[in-house]
Image: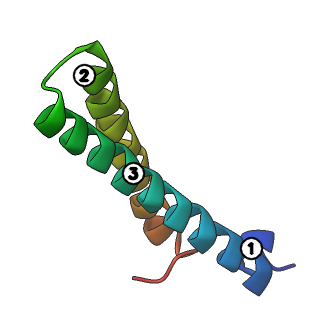
Amino acid sequence: MSDPASSGAARRQLRFAIFLQAMALLMMGGACVLRAAKIGFDPLTLILGVLAILIAVALTFTTRQLRRTGILHP
C-alpha cells in the first residue's frame, strides 16, 4: 500500500501550502519594513515583525520535515 502523502495531488497541496507560507512571510515582512520606514517602530510594527519571524520558522520547519521524509524533493 502506498503512502497517501506521496501521491501527486497531496504533493501539489503541500507545495501550495509552502507557497502560501512564503507569500505570508513576504507580506508580513514587507508590511513590517514599510511601517517601520514610514511611521517608525510602534506596537503594531513589533507584532508584524514577530509574526514574520514565526512564519519564517514555520516555513523552515515544514520544508525541512517534508524533505527529510521524502515527500518534497530537494
Residue lying at the far front of the rendered structure: 38
Residue 27 is marked as 3
SS at badge 1: helix
Q: Mark 2 or mark 1, which has the lower sequence index?
A: 1
Residue bearing the label numbered 2:
46
Report whether 35 appears left or right of 9: left
Residue 10 is marked as 1
Amino acid on which disc 2 is placed: Leu
Q: Residue at x 60, y 62 (%)?
A: 17
In the figure, residue 32 lies in which quadrant?
top left
Q: CA distance from mark 2 to mark 1?
A: 36 Å
In the figure, residue 16 lies in which quadrant?
bottom right
Task: Give the mark toward the camera: 2 or 1.
Answer: 2
Q: CA distance from mark 3 to mark 1?
A: 26 Å
Q: Mark 2 or mark 3, which has the lower sequence index?
A: 3
- Which percent across, then down, holds residue 69? 52, 67
SS at badge 3: helix
